[in-house]
Structures are given as structure tokens and as C-alpha cells.
């Protein structure tokens, strides 16, 4: 199958977003909007972000779009469109490629998102780069720079699950010795971005949000640095899955703080607005935990407290080009 029949094979037969004027099939796509437009791009490379031994092609697509939608969630945006640039090596079959697109479309359909363009080239390593587009009502994008001294620091869901799943998939596990292994593997392969929760915060004037792609040690320091404050996290309050205790202490510590790829939301909000955040969590059935507080800017962006002992928490997540 050549480039042009491949594009034909992924072209949707209908679009879900009424604001779309031109989708796949011209030099560029066109849509119309009176709202604030939010856009992000993230790239996924075989053997860096996924491997064929731990992911079916379907999961590769699902997760790549999920990670991108998670950035829209972290901005408080409603997802609407995506564009996919793909580099395809010779050893990928047409059936596998259509599985990748079907993983993306299954997640996209939950948010009524449309694929409106992309690019197809051949190359050595499967690489998928997805651009997502969403919108917020005027002036309601949620910035990392919005934290203030005195804020409550919260996180959705549980942390460390994705890397635990990756560990289970890549360790010698012939006897299926892990408790809840399907749960951890599912969290790794099919992350659910926290779009509904972030949108339920719409009435708030100020909330800072960041999604957990690299681990909360990094994500918290991004908020602290952007806001010129420091963040103190309480180690024992960081939420983990009930069976997380089966892993070694070092693994637990490392994965919950620096594992990343859980695509939960880390945020800060004024104490007086806490009821709204709580209500949003209840309304959207989202686990929500207070894990620390925002303090006046100190020497380091993030500290971690354990039984009243305060230590500096260094950036420690996944960093490319190191
Ligand atoms: N190569 C690049 N060219 C231009 N801007 C970039 C480039 N790489 C990152 N950025 C910008 O830097 C900022 C931070 O990007 P970063 O990728 O760290 O955030 P993220 O997408 O939330 O995290 P992650 O990629 O770990 O999921 C964003 O505004 C992003 O658009
Ligand atoms: C095969 C394989 N090897 C390693 C990992 C772990 N990993 C890769 S990228 C990343 C952070 C986010 O990256 P980015 O900053 O590019 O969004 C993490 C935790 C994986 N998922 N699969
Ligand atoms: Mg990025
Ligand atoms: Mg992000
Ligand atoms: Mg990153």
C-alpha cells in the first residue's frame, strides 16, 4: 500500500465537530472558533516511549493520543481535533497500522474529537507525533504559573501505576506473581486523561494544573518555578494503589515520585476554593488527594516531608537528551 492509499484508508467518512470546515484532503485543515484555542504536540518513538513487546499496536495509538489529550486536560481545555504525523518502517503491516489508528479513534470518539490531518513518511523507527487542538471559554486556560503561597496541592488518581505496569510487562513473570497485574498493565497501556475533572473546575477563577507525564517531582517543580513559589509534598499522603505495597520500598518511592506516564493531574488551589475541587472530583468520580501545600519561594522549588523531616526533592523524572 502506498502513501496515498494509506491516507485514504485512515480518512474518516464523517466528522464529529460542527466547527470543522475542512478536514483531511486539502493542503491544511480549517475550523472556526470564537473561543480560546489550546494546542499541544507530543511525539512517541519506538523503544523510547513504547516497545512492540509490551504494547499491541492498538495500545500504541490509544496511549499516544491519551498522553496528548492529557496536556489539554492540564490546560482545562475541551479536546476537539488532532493531527497525526507518522514515520513508518518497512516491517509494519497495513493491519498493524490500522490498529494504531483504531486505538486513537476509540479514545477520540469518547471526546467527539476528529482527526483532521497529518503526514505520512517512511523511515527507520516507528514515530508518532500527535498535535491536539482544544478550546476553553475566554481566559479559563489553567497555567502552571497560577500557584500562590497558601494554596493546597492536590493530585488525582494514584501514582506510580504506569511504571509498575511496565515493570510487570518487562520482568520475568512466568508465574504471574504480581497482585492486580491486569490493573497496572491497563494503567500503562490505556491511560485515561482527566478531562472531565479539569472541566468541572470551570467556575474557578484560579487553579494551576500540570499533568503527570514525567513524575510529580518534575511536575511540582514546573509549577513552583513558573509561579515563583515552593511546594512542600507529604510523602505519606501521596496516593498509590492498594496493592502497591507489594513492590520494594525503593520501587514505590521511585515510581510514585518519578515514574511518570500516569497522566493524572497535579494542581494547586486556594483553600477557600477547595469545596469546588472536591465537588468536581465527586461529580466526575475522580479520586482526589491533598498531598501538600504551596509556601513562599525558598531556595529549592520542591521539598518532601516525611514524619516532619523536610528534605529537598530533586527533579528526577524521565529526561530526554541527558
Ligand atoms: N522542540 C520544541 N520546540 C518548541 N517548543 C517546545 C519544544 N519542546 C518543547 N516545547 C515547549 O516547551 C514547553 C514544555 O514542554 P514539555 O514537553 O516539557 O511539556 P509536556 O508536553 O507537558 O511534557 P511531556 O512532553 O513530558 O509530556 C511546552 O510549551 C512545549 O510546547
Ligand atoms: C519502551 C519504554 N521504555 C521506557 C519507558 C518509560 N518512559 C519513556 S518516556 C517517559 C516519560 C515521558 O516522556 P515524554 O517527556 O517524552 O512525554 C517514560 C517514563 C516506556 N514507557 N517505554
Ligand atoms: Mg511535551
Ligand atoms: Mg504536560
Ligand atoms: Mg517530558
Image (cartoon, rainbow, N blue to C red):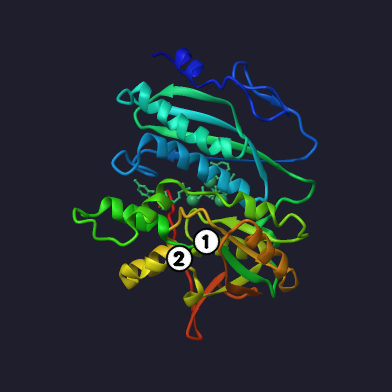
Disc 2, SS: helix
Disc 1, SS: loop
Tell me, for residue 79, which label it has, or none: none
The response on whether ligand 4 sits within 8 Å of label 1 is no
Name above or below for residue 160 compared with residue 84. below
Q: Quadrant of the N terminus?
A: top left
Q: Position of residue 273 (x, y in %)?
A: 74, 68
Query: Which corner quadrant of the image does residue 270 belong to?
Result: bottom right
Judging depth in this view, the residue of 279 and 130 nearest the camera is 279
Q: Quickly name the residue at label 2.
A: 257
**Label 2: few (<14), some or many (≥20) within 10 Å?**
many
Q: Position of residue 275 (x, y in %)?
A: 71, 69
Query: Which corner quadrant of the image does residue 152 belong to?
Result: bottom right
Is 250 situated left or right of 230 in this image? left
- Alpha carbon separation for disc pair 2 and 1: 14 Å
Measuring 67% from the left and 43% from the top, which residue is drawn there?
78
Residue 43 appearing in the image: no
Measuring 48% from the left and 49% from the top, which residue is drawn there?
191
Q: Quickly name the residue at label 1.
A: 157
Query: Which corner quadrant of the image does residue 98 belong to?
Result: top left
Q: How many marks?
A: 2
Name above or below for residue 3 compared with residue 174. above
Residue 259 appearing in the image: yes
Q: Position of residue 13 (x, y in %)?
A: 58, 19
**Label 1: few (<14), some or many (≥20) within 10 Å?**
some
Measuring 78% from the left and 40% from the top, which residue is drawn there?
35
Is 164 situated left or right of 191 in this image? left
Q: First in sequence: mark 2 or mark 1?
A: 1
Measuring 37% from the left and 21% from the top, which residue is drawn there?
94
Amino acid at each position: 500500500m502506498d502513501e496515498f492509499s494509506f491516507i485514504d484508508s485512515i480518512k474518516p467518512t464523517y466528522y464529529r465537530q460542527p466547527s470543522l470546515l475542512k478536514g483531511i484532503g486539502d493542503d491544511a485543515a480549517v475550523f472556526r472558533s470564537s473561543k480560546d484555542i489550546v494546542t499541544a504536540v507530543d511525539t512517541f518513538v519506538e523503544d523510547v516511549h513504547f516497545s512492540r513487546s509490551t504494547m499491541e499496536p492498538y495500545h500504541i495509538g490509544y496511549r499516544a493520543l491519551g498522553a496528548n489529550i492529557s496536556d489539554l486536560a492540564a490546560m482545562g481545555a475541551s479536546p476537539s481535533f488532532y493531527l497525526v504525523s507518522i514515520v513508518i518502517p518497512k516491517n509494519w503491516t497495513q493491519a498493524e497500522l490500522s490498529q494504531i489508528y483504531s486505538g486513537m479513534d476509540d479514545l477520540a470518539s469518547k471526546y467527539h474529537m476528529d482527526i483532521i490531518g497529518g503526514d505520512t513518511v517512511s523511515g527507520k523507527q516507528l514515530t508518532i507525533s500527535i498535535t491536539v487542538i482544544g478550546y476553553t471559554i475566554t481566559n479559563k486556560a489553567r497555567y502552571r504559573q497560577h500557584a500562590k503561597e497558601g494554596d493546597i496541592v492536590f493530585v488525582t488518581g494514584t501514582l506510580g501505576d504506569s511504571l509498575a505496569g511496565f515493570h510487570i510487562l518487562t520482568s520475568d513473570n512466568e508465574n504471574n506473581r504480581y497482585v492486580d497485574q491486569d490493573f497496572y498493565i491497563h494503567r500503562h497501556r490505556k491511560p485515561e486523561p482527566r478531562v472531565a475533572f479539569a472541566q468541572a473546575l470551570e467556575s474557578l477563577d484560579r487553579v494551576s494544573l500540570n499533568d503527570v507525564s514525567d513524575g510529580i517531582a518534575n511536575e511540582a517543580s514546573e509549577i513552583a518555578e513558573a509561579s515563583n513559589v515552593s511546594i512542600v509534598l507529604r510523602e505519606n499522603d501521596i496516593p498509590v494503589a492498594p496493592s502497591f505495597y507489594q513492590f520494594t520500598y525503593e520501587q514505590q518511592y521511585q515510581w510514585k515520585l518519578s515514574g511518570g506516564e500516569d497522566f493524572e493531574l497535579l494542581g494547586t488551589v486556594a483553600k477557600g476554593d477547595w469545596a469546588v475541587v472536591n465537588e468536581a472530583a465527586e461529580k466526575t468520580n475522580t479520586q482526589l488527594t491533598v498531598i501538600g501545600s504551596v509556601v513562599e519561594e525558598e531556595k529549592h522549588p520542591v521539598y518532601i516531608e516525611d514524619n516532619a523531616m523536610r528534605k529537598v526533592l530533586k527533579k528526577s523524572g524521565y529526561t530526554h537528551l541527558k
